[in-house]
Image: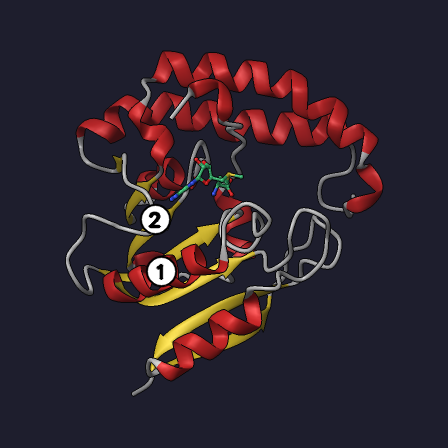
Amino acid sequence: MDLKSIVPWGRSFEEYRKMFSLTDSDLQKNILGCGDGPASFNAELTTRYGSVISIDPVYQFDAALLKNRIAEVYDEVMPQMEANKDQYIWDSIQSVEALGKTRMDAMNRFIQDYEKGKASGRYLNDSLPTLSFSGNQFDLALCSHYLFLYSEHVSLEEHLASIAELCRVAREIRIYPLLMLNGEISPHLSKVIHAVELEGFTAKLVDVDYQFQKGATQMLAITRKT
Ligand SMILES: C[S@@+](CC[C@H](N)C(=O)[O-])C[C@H]1O[C@@H](n2cnc3c(N)ncnc32)[C@H](O)[C@@H]1O
């Protein structure tokens, strides 16, 4: 993986809590964060004594390299957000400037925690669709802003293999958002739901109390049929 090809951009614990409707009881579960990148979910949940492992291919890089890349990406992403701001809802985050601050606060928190978390095994360089965990190692796997969002680059086959792998390692899976970058529902969504139901899982679209990308109001929750 070439560092220049990655666009690290991370969300906060509070955003994860809302995107995935995480209750206090959910936050006590053994959680896998899949594609967490520079989000501060792991850092913040760990300070609350939660149990979480994040995986992402960007964790092959050290903190100094990621920090430099985050600074470069910030200068590229902010003008793009300004140009595309009609695609987002500006209520909890009220301006592009406030968004920049929110994201940088989260990513700085991640950077401060990263080397310590890597040493204790909380940040692992691992990638879908093949994870290095044993079956049912996690109660809950969360995937924010990777599956479905990048459906133009991540094929249906990769989605099916990735979600089958998540179903192998976790008892429950939550994925958000279900829209692509252009705001349309991912064409892979209905096929994924059909495939997991054939494999004996229940897949539900669940309303969440979070919306930044317009129309991104639901997560996909997958559980094993009892
Ligand atoms: C837009 S970022 C989202 C980061 C974080 N989940 C959040 O919502 O703030 C997408 C992340 O997916 C990661 N990613 C890309 N390919 C992946 C793969 N095959 N398996 C797991 N994560 C991957 C990227 O490195 C990046 O950190």
Residue at 77% over, 45% down: 88
Residue 88 lies, with reference to residue 80, above or below; the image says: below
Choose top left, top right, bottom left or bottom right for residue 161.
Answer: bottom left
As drawn, which residue projects farthest toward the left? 134
Quadrant assignment for ligand 1:
top left
Question: Residue 118 appears at what percent x and percent y?
Answer: 24, 29
Could you say whether the residue bearing mark 1 is in a helix, strand or loop?
helix
Task: Tell me: is circle 2 under 8 Å from ligand 1.
Answer: yes
Name the amino acid, label 2.
Leu
Could you say whether the residue bearing mark 2 is in a helix, strand or loop?
loop
Residue at 57% over, 52% down: 151
Residue at 28% over, 40% down: 126
Q: Which residue is mark 2?
A: 128
- The mark that comes first in sequence, 2 or 1, is 2
Residue 91 lies, with reference to residue 164, above or below; the image says: above
Q: CA distance from mark 2 to mark 1?
A: 8 Å
Q: How many marks?
A: 2
Residue 86 lies, with reference to residue 18, above or below; the image says: above
Along the line of sight, the residue nearer the viewer: 116 or 60: 60
Q: Which residue is mark 1?
A: 161
189 relative to 162 in the view: left or right: right
Name the amino acid, label 1.
Ala
**Callout 2 touching callout 1 (CB < 8 Å):** yes
Task: Tell me: is circle 1 under 8 Å from ligand 1.
Answer: no
145 relative to 140 in the view: left or right: right
